Image (cartoon, helix red, strand yellow):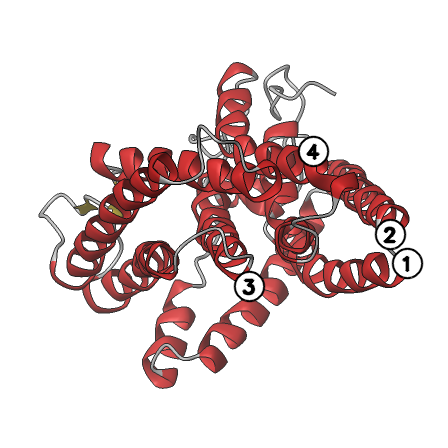
Amino acid sequence: MSQGSVHQADGRPEPAGAAEGPHPASIMPEVTAILRAGRMGPAAFGRIALLALRRGSERVAAFPGLRRSYAAWAVAVALVIAACDVWLGFATSAAAGALTGLAQVVWAGPVLLLGRAQLHLVRAPDGRAFEGFGVANALTLLRLASLPTVFACLVLFPDHPSIAVFTVVIYSVSAGSDLLDGLLARLLRHQTDFGRLWDPVVDIFFNPGAAIALTIAGVAPWWLMLAVVFRYWAALLGGVAVYVFRGPYKVRPTWYGKLSGFVLAFALGFGALALVTEPDWLVGTPLLALYVTSALLTGTNGAYLAISGILYRNPEGEATL
């Protein structure tokens, strides 16, 4: 099945239910009501996740081929993560592998369920439904689902000689997939609404998670962790505030936001390298300078996102976030 093929591209009919248009009935009015009633607390976001799961599960019934494709990719994601956890168990201890595996099940289970519930978003910009989930979307899913394993490698086994290289590799692959999934989507002409929605959501969890892990491991300063958490959660809460209090909008990324994300990826990557190898050319002033630069970029970008999310929306309906 071609990654770039779409229904009706070769004369075949679209699946039942695809005629509803490029955007199925939005759940955002209900989300807005939940957020206003719950004041954007944890309970409110939990209710939103359940709503998305229930409503999305009803919609994907119209896409049997897409469900089969997603099931195959989800199994592949689960097997990759399981293989990493089994190897960790053999390289360290059975207890460590079992603990990491348990955390993975608790985390990845809901992630994969929510991914399946959002299959109606595997559509081209013109609204046509794709037949397959696609490797680019699978990489995005893997980056989010594997977060407990990445966290465990950085926190539980920083000095373990058997997995030092593995820790750097798994972090580099996970972080690098943020660039690779978008590149593959463009090369395979499989750019979907699913990827556009999930990619920034994954960043909101993965980058702060990596910063927190490196801080716990003692290689990253606490002020960098706070700047990273502030930047990404300002993006989430600011975006929610814009929609709830100002209405629908389109996000137009800025060069400054892209620069801060790029520098942050390098800073955290070199932090992971310093954690397991401690190279002389990196430890000390060079790493500190990289951390300071990243904290300044992410902190100021986070402040801009918070202000923009609350106050700014231009007449064209685009927020420069």
Q: Answer with left or right where residue 227 lies relative to residue 76.
A: left
Can I make out residue 129 in this image?
Answer: no
**Mark 3 or mark 4, whichever is nearer to me:** 4
Mark 2 or 4 closer to N-term? 2
Identified by mark 1, the residue type is Ala
**Image coordinates for residue 250, horizontal then vertical, percent:** 27, 45
Total tally of numbered discs in the picture = 4
User: Which type of secondary structure does the marked residue at label 4 adopt?
Assistant: helix
Mark identifier at residue 89: 2
Q: Could you classify mark 3 by the number of other residues whose Cα lies within 10 Å: few (under 14), some (14-19), or many (20 or more)? A: some
Mark toward the start of the polypeptide (2 vs 3): 3
Image quarter of residue 241? bottom left
Question: Residue 270 vs residue 80: left or right?
Answer: left
Q: Amino acid at mark 3?
A: Ala
Instruction: Name the secondary structure under disc 1.
Output: helix
Per the image, label 2 sits on a secondary structure element best described as: helix
Asked if the residue under mark 2 is in contact with the one under mark 1, i.e. CB atoms within 8 Å, the reply is yes
Q: Which residue is mark 4?
A: 165
Q: Measuring from the top left, give residue 259's x and y in whole percent.
A: 28, 33
Q: Earlier in the sequence, mark 3 or mark 1?
A: 3
Q: Which residue is mark 3?
A: 52
Q: Residue furthest front?
A: 280
Label 3 – label 4 distance at C-alpha: 39 Å
Query: For the N terminus, which image quadrant?
Result: top right
State how far apart marks 2 and 4 are (Cα). 16 Å
- Along the viewing direction, whichever of 141 and 243 lies nearer the viewer: 141
Kindly identify which numbered label has been placed on residue 94.
1
- Mark 2 or 4, which is nearer the eye? 4
**Disc 2 versus disc 3: distance between alpha carbons?**
35 Å
Q: Residues within 10 Å of mark 2 (few under 14, many from 20)?
A: some
Label 1: how many Cα within 10 Å (few below 14, some 14–19, many 20+): some
Q: Secondary structure at mark 3?
A: helix
